[in-house]
Image (cartoon, rainbow, N blue to C red):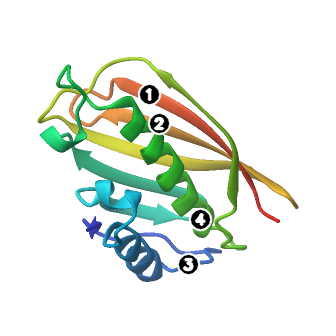
Amino acid sequence: MFRSAGSSGAGSMGFTVENLKQAMKYMVESQGFDRVLNKMKLLSATPGKIVCEMKVEEEHTNRGGTLHGGLTATLVDVVSTAALLCTERAVPGVSVDMNITYTSAAKMGEEILITAQILKQGRNLAFATVDLTNKATGKLIAQGRHTKYLG
């Protein structure tokens, strides 16, 4: 499950940090695909920004022993959606576009940080960016952009 390593943030957040932790826990404890994220920890949540961490374990890797690209895409999707829940509107939206640039590998045993930031939230669309970085070195592993329809 998602585990909090501390909570911070105040201001105009739709979800409180505790509400967000509960929503994320429900998601990863489901029988659906998102349960692959059960080792991710929520570090902080402020309006429009979420920071999580995860240790790359064997279940997260490809045949080369590095973080699987599909899991990276899932991290971009889920963590940017969580950042949307931490806005005043607190609407998760529906994905309309997502792209990811992979810049380096994360090896098994390495800790990664996943930082999602809402760039803009309009009437119908929201735009987010997500950086995956090596926690020890700060090296960029991947950068994602996510566009969501808010309805």
SS category of the residue bearing label 2: strand
**Label number found at residue 20:** none
Work out how far the residue at label 1 is from the one at label 3, CA to CA, in angstroms: 27 Å
Image location of residue 146, percent across then percent down: 64, 42
Nearest to the eye among marks 1 and 3: give it: 1
Residue 33, image quadrant: bottom left
In this rendering, the answer to whether 4 lies above or below 138 is below
Question: Which amino acid, mark 4?
Answer: Pro
Q: Earlier in the sequence, mark 1 or mark 3?
A: 3
Q: Which residue is mark 2?
A: 131
Q: Earlier in the sequence, mark 2 or mark 3?
A: 3
Q: Earlier in the sequence, mark 4 or mark 3?
A: 3
Local crowd at mark 4 within 10 Å, few (<14), some, or many (≥20)? many
Q: Which residue is mark 4?
A: 47
SS category of the residue bearing label 4: loop
Work out how far the residue at label 1 is from the one at label 2, CA to CA, in angstroms: 6 Å
Residue at horizontal 42%, vertical 17%? 103
Work out how far the residue at label 1 is from the one at label 4, CA to CA, in angstroms: 23 Å
Image location of residue 124, percent across then percent down: 86, 58
In this rendering, the answer to whether 31 lies above or below 43 is below
Q: Which residue is mark 3?
A: 15
Residue at horizontal 20%, vertical 40%? 56
SS category of the residue bearing label 3: loop
Local crowd at mark 1 within 10 Å, few (<14), some, or many (≥20)? many
In the displayed structure image, the side of residue 82 where residue 108 appears, left or right: left
Q: Earlier in the sequence, mark 2 or mark 4?
A: 4
Image location of residue 41, percent across then percent down: 28, 60
